Image: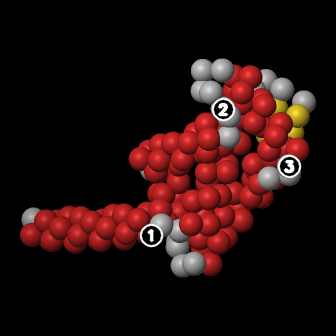
């Protein structure tokens, strides 16, 4: 019985340390400006294409951009598990979506008016911004 209790305690200690490491990594990733800018770009592009029927995503470019962010995080010392936990975290997702919406609103989107997403999306495509590179007009 002692062996089982000792094993369970050891396993829970390793899990707690791993959870603490992931939480610390999430905090560090949250502070990484380039990665966060990139995630906001992806979220803004996603919001545009979801709300504008005449704009669609460039999936290969979006995938490549996301991969470049993951590579940057790896280069800066984050593990795949830490990156995955960060991008799947609901609080972080909501934070990034909020920042993307703030950007879109500051550039003319009115969330209750889908046509404004099209206007902003076409503007982003026209100026060949990072958001615009991830989108195409149909």
Asked which secondary structure carries label 2, the reply is loop
Quarter of the picture holding the C terminus: top right
On screen, residue 32 versus residue 2, left or right, reads right
Residue at the image point whose x is 72% and y is 30% from the top: 117
Q: CA distance from mark 2 to mark 1?
A: 31 Å
Q: Secondary structure at mark 3?
A: loop
Residue at coordinates 41% horizontally, 65% vertically from top-left?
27
The residue carrying mark 3 is 127
Q: Is residue 19 left or right of residue 43?
A: left
Residue 45, position as x, y percentages in the image: 71, 42
Foreground pick, 2 / 13: 13
Viewer can see residue 50: no
Of mark 3 and mark 2, the one earlier in the sequence is 2
Local crowd size for mark 1, using a 10 Å CA cut-off: few (<14), some (14–19), many (≥20): few
Based on the displayed image, in which of its 4 quarters is residue 28 positioned?
Answer: bottom left
Classify 10 Å Cα crowding around label 3: few (below 14), some (14-19), many (20 and above): few
According to the picture, the residue beneath numbered tag 1 turns out to be 28
Quarter of the image that includes the N terminus? bottom left
- Mark 2 sits on what residue? 109
Asked if disc 2 and disc 1 are in contact, CB closer than 8 Å, the reply is no
Q: Position of residue 67 (x, y in %)?
A: 71, 61
Q: Judge whether 92 appears above or below 54 on screen.
A: below
Question: Is residue 112 visible from the viewing direction of this image?
Answer: yes
Circle 1 — which element?
helix
Considering only vertical position in the picture, is 110 above or below 14?
A: above
Residue 55 sits in quarter:
top right
Question: Does label 1 or label 3 sit earlier along the sequence?
Answer: 1
Total residue callouts: 3
Left/right placement of residue 25 relative to residue 33 reads left
Residue 60 rendering spot, x and y as whole percentages: 82, 50
Q: Residue at x 47, y 57 (%)?
A: 85
């Amino acid at each position: 019985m002692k062996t089982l209790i000792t094993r369970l305690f050891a396993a829970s200690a390793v899990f707690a340390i791993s959870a603490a490491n992931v939480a610390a990594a999430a905090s560090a990733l949250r502070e990484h400006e380039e990665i966060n800018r990139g995630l906001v770009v992806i979220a803004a592009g996603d919001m545009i294409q979801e709300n504008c029927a005449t704009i669609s995503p460039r999936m290969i470019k979006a995938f490549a951009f996301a991969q470049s962010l993951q590579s940057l995080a790896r280069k800066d010392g984050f593990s795949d598990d830490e990156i995955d936990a960060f991008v799947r975290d609901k609080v972080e997702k909501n934070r990034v979506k909020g920042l993307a919406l703030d950007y879109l609103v500051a550039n003319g989107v009115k969330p209750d008016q889908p046509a404004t997403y099209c206007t902003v999306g076409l503007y982003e495509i026209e100026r060949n911004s990072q958001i615009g590179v991830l989108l195409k007009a149909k």
